[in-house]
Every structure is written in C-alpha cells, then in structure tokens.
C-alpha cells in the first residue's frame, strides 16, 4: 500500500506528491458532488405543437420551413415551423442557477473582505475565526456556479442557434 507523501519517479525524473488516504477520496467525492447539478439537467428541447403531442429532442438544424429534431429513441422528426407553438430550450435554468451561485459566492467573498482588520494592512487578520465558514461556502458556490453557467449557457445557445436557419440571426415562430 502506497504511503501519502513525496515520492520520486524514476521514469519521469520528477518528484510527485501522492495523496492516497481519506483526504484524497473525500476531495474527489466533494468535487463530484459539487458538479452533479451541472450534469443533472436536461439537454433536450421540448417542442410544443399545435397539431400533435409535444416532442422532446435535440434540435439538430432548421430551414425556412421546418425544424429537424432527434429524439433519445433515435428517431428524427421534421416539424413544420407553423406547427410549433412554443419551444422550451434546454440550459436556461442551469445557467440562471449557476449565475445565482456565482453572485452568492462573490457576495460571501465581499463579506469576508469587510470582516478583515483594515487598521493594520500588514496583518489583515480576520476578526473572527468563523470567517472560514463563509470562505468555504463561497468557494463551493463558485466551484458549482461557474461550470453550471458555462455548460447551461452553451447548451441554450446551441439549441437557439439550431432553430435559426443559416444566414439569419433571429427567427421568430410564425403566429397564424
């Protein structure tokens, strides 16, 4: 069983620090738990139709007359634009929640900054030892919020851009 500490690798001629105990497994679990909300949201759009049931799938492309979607079952549908009543794009909720977490994390960091002793800039000590708690919460909010915002925004942007035919910036659904 490998011990935790510094080891020398003969093959790469470098020193490495190996964490093999509880701390390394705990850190991995914490990171995976923090990123779970990012990947737990849907990546498919819901197309609400006028003349049939809703279709849930990935919007692959579009042209002036229709949208083309792939479902999770592997089917491809061509849906006339006039038949689409509403589109619920994926990723928007994930991005908004991620932005909220980033705002909370920044707010906590600002609160910590306000609690430092400004009278002695060389020391800059905290007035309370409990300031570590909001620092950990702020870090967790940022670790979860940044990937949620990036992944959610990317998913939303891809879905919205697939609705617009090539060469057009924004296309609205036709209202009969």
Image: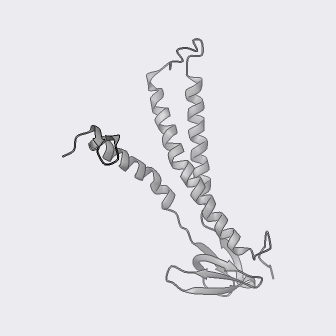
Quarter residue 161 falls in = bottom right
Q: With 123 as the anchor, is 169 left or right in this view?
A: right
Q: Looking at the image, is 30 positioned above or below residue 164?
A: above
Residue 16 % position (x, y): 34, 41
Q: Residue at x 62, y 54 (%)?
A: 96
For the view shown, which residue lies furthest in the top direction? 120
Q: Looking at the image, is 76 positioned above or below residue 136?
A: below
Total number of numbered labels? 0
Q: Looking at the image, is 155 positioned above or below residue 149?
A: below
| Placement of the C terminus among the 4 image quadrants | bottom right
Whether residue 54 is visible here, answered yes or no, is: no
For the view shown, which residue lies furthest in the left direction? 1
Q: Residue at x 59, y 53 (%)?
A: 149
Residue 87 % position (x, y): 67, 73
Quarter residue 83 falls in = bottom right
Whether residue 175 is visible here, answered yes or no, is: yes
Q: Residue at x 18, y 46 (%)?
A: 1
Residue 71 % position (x, y): 54, 80
Q: With 172 as the anchor, is 5 left or right in this view?
A: left
Q: Looking at the image, is 15 positioned above or below residue 163?
A: above
Residue 140 % position (x, y): 48, 42
* Nearest to the observer: residue 13 or residue 60: 13
Q: With 120 as the anchor, is 12 left or right in this view?
A: left
């Amino acid at each position: 069983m490998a011990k935790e500490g510094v080891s020398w690798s003969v093959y790469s001629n470098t020193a490495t620090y190996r964490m093999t105990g509880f701390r390394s497994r705990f850190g991995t679990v914490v990171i995976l738990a923090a990123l779970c909300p990012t990947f737990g949201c849907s990546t498919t759009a819901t197309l609400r139709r006028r003349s049939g049931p809703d279709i849930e799938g990935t919007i692959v492309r579009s042209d002036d007359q229709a949208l083309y979607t792939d479902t999770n079952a592997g089917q491809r549908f061509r849906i006339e634009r006039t038949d689409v009543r509403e589109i619920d794009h994926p990723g928007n909720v994930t991005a908004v929640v991620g932005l909220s977490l980033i705002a909370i994390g920044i707010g906590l960091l600002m609160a910590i900054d306000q609690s430092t002793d400004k009278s002695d800039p060389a020391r800059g000590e905290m007035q309370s030892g409990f300031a570590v708690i909001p620092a950990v919460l702020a870090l967790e909010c940022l670790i979860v919020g940044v990937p949620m915002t990036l992944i959610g925004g990317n998913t939303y942007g891809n879905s919205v851009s697939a609705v617009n035919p090539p060469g057009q910036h924004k296309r609205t659904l036709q209202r009969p």
